[in-house]
Amino acid sequence: MYKRYEWLIGTRYLRSTHRRGFVSFVALMSVCGLALGVATLIVVLSVMNGFGRELRSRILSVTSDATIMGLQGAIPGWQAVQRRVERQAHVLAAVPYIEEQAMLSHGQRIAGASVRGVLPAEEKRVTALARHLAAGSLDELRPGRYGVILGVDLARALGVKVGQSVVLIAPEGVATPAGLEPRMRRFDVVGLFHSGMYEYDRQLALINLTDASRLFGLGPDEVTGMRLKLDDPWQAPQVVRRVAYALGGAGYYVSDWTDKHANFFRSIEITKSMMFVILSMIVAVAAFNIVATLVMIVKEKQSDIAILRTFGARPVNVLAVFAVQGVLIGLAGTMLGAALGVLVSDHLQALVSLLERLVHTQFLNPKVYYMSELPAHVQGSDVLRVCGVAFLLCALATIYPAWRAARTAPAEALRHE
């Protein structure tokens, strides 16, 4: 196959033979440095992606995609509202709930909590909480039994275990001849859940919807709101507002999981962007090594450049010879780094576990980070962005050495030959 001589000469200069061995070694080091920089950037971005996805998964396992609540504090006739909501587009399920703040006591210990009344069979349609139960079952929350499922940290704060009981004290009292007395009821602990999110494990208690209605003084067909499961959680802000408008709009307050945990994901995105900018400096340093490599090649090949010029090569042809070398170094380093970064990201947890066994330590304490494993998720868009930036920096790095080679004067280069 016909090849332009610029390509043949450029690739020849990168191969190691005789005097050019050192130059080729420097070129190899440039490729390795660029590959390490690209791989590091891909691994870090993958860890940030995995961390965000893990947080989102844990949040959605306890809470719903979206919530519709009554502005007056309760939604009457929830069965009819449920049927109307589930007929809306993109809504997979809608379940009722009652949620109020209350106090729980056990012995001398007392703790505040958010008490949520649910229907066990319906709750499984909107959350994956049933898969996070450390003990017991949602089906134990039968009406009239007055059972409660606590978060593991809330149970630890109260010093209570499954089979024991707690006293639940509602914020609103009951008027009696003796005065205003708090509304309270003894509940048996029938289960514990562990979501991995301290916010829920420490502050959430689940009871049956009927028991919650009696405890908080609501009517038999009244609930606090409806919790929605959508076909696309990322569309929750738009979908839940359309559903509220379909119900009438004026008497409802809507929220979604992105509102409640916006700071979590905003901080992750900001951190991810900053890490991309900072670690891009590593790639930039590796690209600058290409400048040094090509400058050395240009210095060594002064006589060769002069001979090419005397044979009729134009400055643009000489520039192309050295641009080929820089592009090849950049392409090799970028592709090798991308492959290495994806490979390490896919096996990161195994590598971390091996390192933990070797140094006899634990890098991620679940009591601090709420996860014991280091998640990583490779996104194709991130890989393409990293590779694009790396290759662009390498292409820019070839401009000065190639321009310097193109300006070589044949007479000056051959004067001492």
Image (tube, helix red, strand yellow):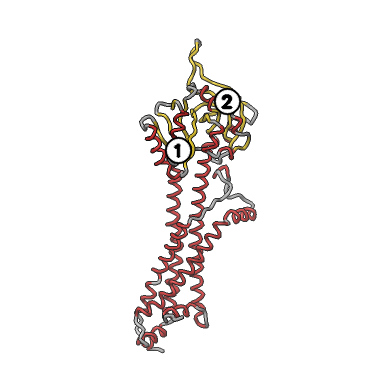
Secondary element type, mark 1? strand
Q: N-terminal of the two: label 1 or label 2?
A: 1
Viewer-proximal residue among 8 and 303: 8
Residue 126 visible within the image: yes
Viewer-proximal residue among 355 and 146: 146
Residue beneath label 2, please?
143
Residue type, numbered disc 1? Ala
Local crowd size for mark 1, using a 10 Å CA cut-off: few (<14), some (14–19), many (≥20):
many
- The residue that appears at 54% across and 31% down in the rendered structure is 119
Local crowd size for mark 2, using a 10 Å CA cut-off: few (<14), some (14–19), many (≥20):
some
How far across and down, in percent of the image, does residue 118 sit?
53, 30
Secondary element type, mark 2? loop
Q: In the figure, 117 relative to 44: above or below?
A: above
Residue beneath label 1, please?
66
Q: In the figure, 319 relative to 207: above or below?
A: below
Residue type, numbered disc 2? Pro
Question: Residue 98 has which mark?
Answer: none
Viewer-proximal residue among 361 and 147: 147
- The residue that appears at 37% across and 33% down in the rendered structure is 249
How far across and down, in percent of the image, does residue 188 sit?
61, 26
Viewer-proximal residue among 324 and 66: 66
- The residue that appears at 44% across and 27% down in the rendered structure is 75
316 displayed left or right of 222: left
Residue 108 visible within the image: no
